[in-house]
Image (tube, rainbow, N blue to C red):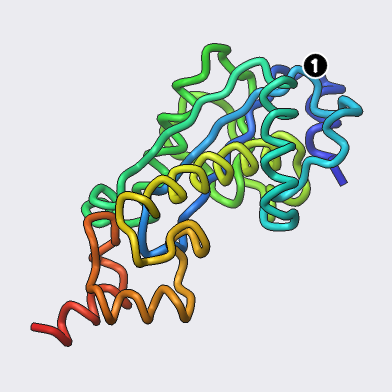
Amino acid sequence: MKVIERLLLDAGITPLAGVDEAGRGACAGPLLVAAVILRDPFAPELAKVRDSKEISEAAREDLFDVVVDASESISIIEIPSSLVDERGVHAANIDGMRRAVHGLTVLPKYVLTDGYVIPGLGFPTLGVWKGDQVVHTISAASIIAKVTRDRIMREMDSEYPGYGFAQHKGYVTASHKKALEELGPCAIHRYSFANVAGLINSLA
C-alpha cells in the first residue's frame, strides 16, 4: 500500500518528509504537528508503524522510540489552544505544518501530508487522502505527534485536575462533558469550539 513512497524513492526523489497532526478534533489542549524524514521508510524495524489511531497507547509509546531511532530529522510544532481559537483550527494546522517542515534540519526533496496540501511551502508537496494509513513517513509523523500530545495532556491532568485529561486527552467524551459542566472551562480549553462556547453562553 506504500506505492507513493516507493515510486518517489525509485525515481531518486529523496529525502521524503511526512507530515501529520494530532489533536485537531479535541476541545482542549494544543494542536501538535510533526514532520519526519526517515532514513529508509521501508526498513524492517518500521513494519509495525501505521496510523497512530489504529494502535494502542502502549504500542505508540514503543513505536515512538523506533521512529526516533529510524529518523534522519524530526520537527515538532506545538500550537496552543489560544492560537487555535485565534486562527481557527484549519488555518492553525496548515501554519503548523509549514513551520514543522521548515524546522527540519534536513531539507526534503518532497513532502507528503495527511489530506491537506500545504500552500506556500516552497517544496514539492502532495496531500494524500488517508495518508496516515497508506504512507509510512506520514504514519511515522502521526505517531510522533500523537505520543507527544498525549504526554502533554498527561502533564495537563496534574496542572488542571478534575477534567480527566490523562484519560480522554481533551477530546469530547461523556466524562469530559460532565467535568466541563461541573468545573467550567479551564485555560487550555478551546473557547471557539461549539461545545465550550455553548457552555459559556449558557452560564452567561
When asked about the image quadrant of residue 18, the answer is top right
- Residue 14 in the image: above or below residue 60: above
Question: Which residue is outermost to the top?
Answer: 106
Q: Is residue 87 left or right of residue 54?
A: left
When asked about the image quadrant of residue 16, the answer is top right
Residue sitting nearer the eye, 79 or 127? 79
Residue labelled with disc 1:
12
| Residue at 46% in and 37% down | 97
In the image, residue 87 lies at what x, y percent?
26, 51
Residue sitting nearer the eye, 131 or 39? 39
In the image, residue 172 lies at what x, y percent?
45, 72
Question: Which residue is outermost to the bottom?
Answer: 202
- Residue 175 in the image: above or below residue 35: below
In the image, residue 199 lies at what x, y percent?
23, 81
User: Callout 1: 10 Å neighbours few (<14), some, many (20+)?
Assistant: few
When asked about the image quadrant of residue 28, the answer is bottom left
Q: Is residue 204 left or right of residue 86?
A: left
Q: Is residue 129 visible?
A: no
| Mark 1, secondary structure of its residue | loop
| Residue at 75% in and 28% down | 66
Residue sitting nearer the eye, 162 or 55? 162
Q: Is residue 202 left or right of residue 18?
A: left
| Residue at 41% in and 45% down | 155
- Under mark 1, the amino acid is Gly
| Residue at 71% in and 50% down | 51
Q: Is residue 100 left or right of residue 12?
A: left
